[in-house]
Image (tube, rainbow, N blue to C red):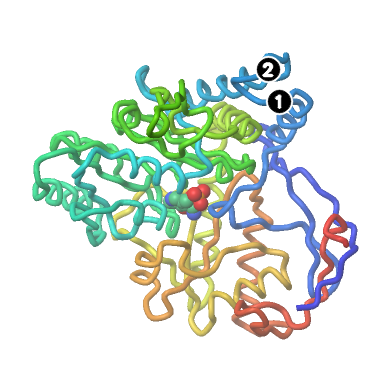
Amino acid sequence: MTLTVGSTIDSTEIRVRQDIPAVLGTRVPLVTGGETGYANLDHAASAPCLAAVRDAVDAFLPWYASAHRGAGFASQVSTRVYERAREVLRKFAGARDRDTVIFTRNTTDALNLLARALPRHTSVVLFDTEHHAALLPWRGPNVVRIPAPRTRLAAVAAVERALAGCPAGPRLVVLTGASNVTGETLPVAEIAAVARRHGARTALDAAQLAPHRPISLTGLDVDYVVLSGHKLYAPFGAGALIGRADWLRAATPYLAGGGATKAVTRHETGVGVTWHTGPERHEAGSPNIVGVHALAVACEQLGAHWDALEAHEHALLERLRAGLAAVPGLAELRLFDDESDRTGTVSFTLDGFEPGWLSAVLSAEYGIGVRDGAFCAHIATRRLAGQGAQAVRVSLGLGTTEEHIDRLVLALRQIVARGARWTYGRPAGRWAPVPDPRPLPPFLAG
Ligand code: PMP
């Protein structure tokens, strides 16, 4: 692939409505010459940074210092920033007083931490259509991966049946709030109620739900929530596990090291360690204060604008689905036959077109960013996309405008009608324009 460095592509802020927080946008080059505003339709993978998050990080950076251990004033400010973020996340997730907030790198990290903290012989029940981050961390003979049923009602009943068949002992249901493949939401409160009746706890994977809908541990009566900052418009490497403290307090620390320890002493045969019992127990090492601050600011921003966000997304999703429905040969993927609330994520296949090729063309010729493949949910995508086991995913968010959607729909219609205008190959195993004359941004020069 030939990439030339050196164009001037200015950053822009996108504010779609006055009552919706602005996000950072950019312009991208086209293979056919010139450039265009980037139509980022890949929010479900990683959302762009909120302008308010960028500003908050900028304001904090001069004060950045180590948290918890420093006597310097900046250290105290940093500690305050870090601990304030716990309170913000607690509120954002509708946590109960006794719930703990543990900062992690992302949702994957949070779910792996929870998996390590389960009491021995915990039975774990989940659908096989979960994202790999939720599907894979659980070990042992008592993990039940239920083939996902075709209706939401049947999904609740399937969890109930699986729990009834679990051996005595601790139980956990793991459930995504919204599918990262289809955007369909799951009946979380109903499943949590069933879990409760069967003495099970529920862990909600809110990676895809939290950027789109208010979540509440209390309201949904779930026990744990996990989420990622980079999907919440705060791409600075922080995520969180929020929920009941008891299993976590009793568990072996996730990482062994400084920050997690109260005291370490030398014995003749080794060292003795007294571990913290609070969230620090699982946060060894220097914490990501900038990331955690960014995440908290993003949560505050979203929390203050839910009505506008949902209305905006709803209108865009209708426009998108209506537009896609009119593209010949296009089939939308669905988990459930019955209607459910949906976040702004739609995956589809297009007869006669490979998803990877299609997304390369959308990027190169139209300046549109979408995702193709199986979305780290291989079982779900294979089941829904059929033969090819791959699809194209379009996901909306705060940076999405009507123009982005119209551009996508028009592009798909043009591609179906007359194919691509450029040549494409698989130089590195992925479809890409060949040659690729698009210049990289100047900061990548050298
Ligand atoms: N769960 C779901 C539903 C997701 O969509 C994702 C990310 N695609 C994850 C978990 C994992 O999130 P992360 O990559 O931030 O750890």
Task: Tell me the quadrant of the picture where the N terminus can be found.
Answer: bottom right
Is disc 1 placed on a helix, strand or loop?
loop
Q: Do the residues bearing badges 1 and 2 touch, measured as CB atoms within 8 Å?
A: yes
Q: Foreground residue, 238 or 312?
A: 238
User: Badge 2 is on which residue?
Assistant: 77
- The answer to whether 253 is drawn above or below residue 147 in the figure is above
Is disc 2 placed on a helix, strand or loop?
helix
- The answer to whether 412 is drawn above or below residue 97 in the figure is below
Q: Residues within 10 Å of mark 2 (few under 14, many from 20)?
A: some
Q: Position of residue 396 (x, y in %)?
A: 57, 52
| Front position among marks 1 and 2 | 1
Q: Residues within 10 Å of mark 1 (few under 14, many from 20)?
A: many
Q: What type is the residue that disc 2 sits on?
A: Val
Residue at 66%, 19% in the rendered image: 70
Task: Tell me the quadrant of the picture where the C terminus can be found.
Answer: bottom right
Residue at 72%, 68% in the rendered image: 366
Where residue 65 is drawn, which disc sits there? 1
Can the viewer see residue 48 in this picture?
yes
Q: Position of residue 66 (x, y in %)?
A: 66, 26
Q: Foreground residue, 265 or 53?
A: 265
Q: Please tell me in which quadrant of the rendered image residue 206 appears.
A: top left
